[in-house]
Amino acid sequence: MKLLGYLSELTIPLVIFYIVGYGLLQKKQVYEYFVFGAEEGLRIVVRILPTLVGLMVGVGVLRASGFLDYIGGLLGQAAGQIGLSGELIPVIIVRMFSSSAATGLCLDIFKEFGPDSLLGRTVSIMMGCTETIFYTMSVYFMAVKVKKTRYTLQGALIATFAGVAASIFLAGKMG
């Protein structure tokens, strides 16, 4: 077990050393490439910042207004028929927009029900197997100027609902 701990601590430094060493062996200007990549990264951050701020403000307004709790209560009754608790509905909705806001809701569930409860286990698994669909699409597609998304949204929604279903199933098997 200690061997795995040592390997996990050494993985990132070894990968960095490998990349730098390989670049030097190929007689590439490693530092200049690094600086160029950092500059390009900052340009992308500046381009996507308005979208990020808009998403965070929108999620904050929905959460502070109580709208998410209202939707959770409304949909929770119908969702209870398939084993989905109403407390998970706001997490599912917010997770599609913001990972940090969903983490806040996840922590609220942990405080109220406990991390080892069925809800705690379900939301933990859900956070690991779902994605911030709208955040990812808006930020990354805008950064690379994708105009036609084709079936991205439909596929992402199907994957999210599959992740939610898997979370319910797996958490139920764990308890």
Image: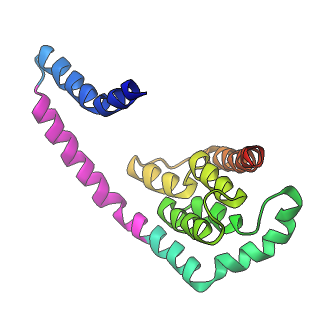
Residue 41 x %, y % = 26, 48
Examine the rendered structure and indicate whether residue 26 appears above or below residue 156: above
Predominant SS of the magenta segment:
helix
Taking the spot 57% from the left edge, 47% from the top edge, the residue there is: 128
Numbered label tally:
0
Q: Residue furthest top?
A: 25
Residue 85 horizontal/vertical position (percent): 77, 64
Q: Is residue 76 left or right of residue 154?
A: right
- Look at 30% across and 56% down and name the residue there: 45
Furthest toward the bottom, the residue is 65
Most foreground residue, 168 or 138: 168
Task: Report x, y in % for residue 118.
Answer: 72, 57
44 is within the stretch colored magenta: yes
Q: Residue at x 50, y 57 (%)?
A: 135
- Residue 38 in the figure: left or right of residue 63: left
The answer to if 172 sits in the magenta stretch is no
Q: Name the one closer to the observer, 41 or 23.
A: 23
Q: How is the image coloured?
A: rainbow
First to last magenta residue range:
29-53
Using the image as rendered, state which of residue 162 and residue 57 is in the foreground: 162
Quadrant occupied by the N terminus: top left
Is 144 left or right of 10, judged from the image as shown?
right
Residue 113, position in %: x, y?
66, 67
In the rendered view, would you say 90 is above or below 140? below
Q: Residue furthest front?
A: 2
Relative to 81, say whether 108 is above or below.
below
| Relative side of 86 to 136, left or right | right
